[in-house]
Image (cartoon, coloured by chain):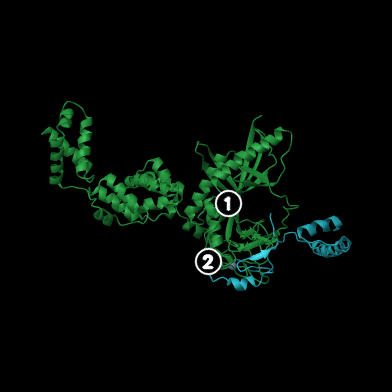
Chain colours: A cyan, B green
Amino acid sequence: MKITEEMVDYISVLSRLKPEPEEKAQLATELERIVSYMDVLNRLDTAGVEPLSHVFPIKNVMRPDLPCPSLPREGLLKNAPSEDPEAFLVPKAVE
Amino acid sequence: MTWETVIGLETHVELATRTKIFCSCTTEFGGAPNTHCCPVCTGMPGTLPVLNEKVLEFAVKAGLALDGEITHHCKFDRKNYFYPDLPKAYQVSQLYLPIVRNGKVPIRTQSGTEKIIRIHELHMEEDAGKLVHDPWLDQTRCDYNRCGVPLIEIVTEPDFRTAEEVIAYLEKLRSTLQYLGVSDCKMQEGSLRCDVNLSVRPAGSAQLGTRTEMKNLNSFKAIARAIAYESRRQVELIEEGKRVVQETRRWDDNKDATFAMRSKENAQDYRYFPEPDIPPLEITQEYLDHIRKELPEMAEHKLIRYQAEFGLPLYDAQMLTGQKALADFFEACAALGSDPKQVSNWIMGPLMGQLSAKGLEAKDMALSPATLARLISLVKAGQLNRNTAVKVFEAVFDQDGDVDTYISAHGLAQVNDPDALAAAVEKVFSANPQSIEDFRSGKEKAFGFLVGQVMRELRGKANPQAVNQAIRDKLNS
Ligand SMILES: [Zn+2]
C-alpha cells in the first residue's frame, strides 16, 4: 500500500502531531514499510476463519457492582502534568 | 411547497449502577471534584479496566424491554478522539457489535397518532468528565467524577416527523427505563440526554435531505423548540436557494436558536478498533432467560390489569401507570386494603395537587402508602369527613406525619355523637326561622344554607350525610 504525504498529513491531524515538512517523506516511507507487513498476513487464506476479537481464549470477565474507595485526590493529582488543589489543569480546550 | 421534517434521536442514558463501568469508583452524583476517581477512570497507563456485570444486565434488560435482538457475541471498541473530557483520549464504546439491535417502541401522541419507532441499536459506553473553562486564563479545569459512569446510547431510525412524536417517544422511553430500574432518567442532572438529527424534504419525497445534529438539549421543552427552530432554518435555507451543511449545531436555550459548533477538521474519523483490554462477551440463552424472568411488569401490562383487576376507568389507569412511582404507590395502598377507586381519586386529586404545588416528582415524595391508606379507612369508617381528610392529607404530606396524632392534636375527628348533632340542629333551627319558612315554601337553596350552618356549629367535623339526614328529619317532623 502506497502512503502518500497527504496521508501523512491526515494522520498527523488525527493524532495532533505537527511533523516538520522535511520529515514527511521519511515518515511516509517508514509508515509504508510498517503497513507492508500486513501484506504478509494478507497472503494467508482466511476463508472460513472466524474474525478474532481478542487474542486470549477468555470471555465474560466481569466484576460485581460493589463500590471501593477511590484514590485520595491528593495522590491522584500527583499524576497530573498541571493541577490545582481540586482539579487537573489543561490548556484551554473549547469544543 | 410543503415540507416534511425527518428526525432521528440518539439518547444517552446514565445507568443506575452503584459503581462505574470499568472500575469500582462510586457513581454517586455530586461530590467534590475528582474525589470519585482512581487510576482506571483517569486513564493512567498500565491500568486494566474490568466490566461491571450490572451494566451488562441493565443494557440487556433495556434491550428486552425495547423489544430488541440481543447480540450473543458482543464486544467493546475504542472510539479515538482527543479532548480532555476523556483522559484516555478514547472512549470505550461499541461500534461493530452493539449489545442490542432492531428494537421497537410503540408511541401514542397527545393528538392520538400511533406509530412504531424503530430502534437501530443500543450500546454500552462510558461517560466523559466535566470541563470548566477559565474565563480569564488559558486554562481548563477537568473533573473526572462522571468519567467512566456507565451509559447506554439508544439510537432510533429516522422515524419521527414532529416534535410531538419525539416527546411521546422520550416520555415512553423514560417511563420504560424507570420501570426497569435501570436509570432514574433525570434530565436536570444529565442522566438522560438527547441529540437530535434533523433534516427536511419536500413532503412525499422518499429521499432524505442533508441533516444536522443538535446537541445541548436538556429539557423536553428545549427539544420541542429546537426542532421547530431548526426545521424552519433548513426550509428557509433551501427556499433561498442555499444548501444545508451537514454539521453539529448547539442549541442555545436563552437565544432560542441553534448555532454551528466550530467545525472540527476530520472530526468524524474516530478510527475505531476493538478494545483489547475487555475480553468479548458471550451471552447465553440461560442468561437471557434469567434476565427475562427478572423483568418487572411494564406500564402497558399494568394498564390492562388495573382496569380488569381493580375496575379502574381507562383514564385512571393511564394516569397511575404513567409514572412507576405512582403505580407502586397505588398498588401498595390497594395491598393495604384500601378501595382502589378511592386510592386512585386521592392520587389523581390531592396527591398530584401537592406534587405540582411543591414542584416535586412522585418518586421523591416522603408520603407513605400506609398514611394514605389510614386516611381512607378513617373516612370510610365515618371518623373523618372528606374535606377534613384533605386538610389532614395536606398537613402530613411533606413529612409523612402521623394521621391519628395530627387529628387528635387538632381536634378534627368527625362528630358522630347524635346528641351533639341534634343540639346543633336545634340551635340552628331556632336561630333561622326565616330559612325554614323559605324551604317549606319551596326554596331548595335554604336547605344548603341550613346544612352549612350546622356544619359550622360542629366546626366542619360532622358527617355530611348525617347532617343532611338530621335536618330532613327535623323539617319533616
Ligand atoms: Zn475509578
How far across and down, in percent of the image, does residue A34 sit? 83, 65
Nearest the camera: B64 or B276? B276
Q: Disc 2 to disc 1, how far (Cα)?
A: 24 Å
Q: Tag 2: Cα neighbours inside 10 Å, few (<14), some, or many (≥20)?
A: many
Q: Secondary structure at mark 2?
A: loop
In the picture provided, is B372 more to the left or to the right than B245? left
Q: Nearer the viewer, residue B294 or B327?
A: B327
The C terminus of chain B, quarter of image: top left
- Please tell me the numbered disc located at residue B185: none
Q: To which quarter of the image does residue B141 belong?
A: bottom right
Which residue in the structure is indicated by mark 2? Answer: A65
Chain of residue at mark 1: B
Crowd rating for badge 1 (residues with CA inside 10 Å; few <14, some 14–19, many 20+) = many
Q: Chain of mark 2?
A: A
Quarter placement of the N terminus of chain B: top right
The relative height of residue B405 versus residue B169 in the rendered view (above or below) is below
- Assess mark 2: CB under 8 A from ligand 1? no
Whether residues under marks 2 and 1 lie with C-beta atoms below 8 angstroms apart, the answer is no
Q: Is residue A44 above or below residue B46?
A: above
- Quadrant location of ligand 1? bottom right
Question: Where in the figure is residue B62, as x and y percent of width and height?
Answer: 53, 54
For residue B342, say whether it is visible: yes
Residue drawn at (54%, 40%), measured in percent from left and top? B164
Disc 2 versus disc 1: nearer the observer: 1
Q: Amino acid at mark 1?
A: Arg
The residue carrying mark 1 has its beta carbon less than 8 Å from ligand 1: no
Q: Tag count in the figure?
A: 2
- Of B83 and B162, nearer the camera is B83
Write down the residue under mark 1: B193
Hey, which quadrant is residue B238 in on the image?
top right
What amino acid type is highlighted by mark number 2? Asp
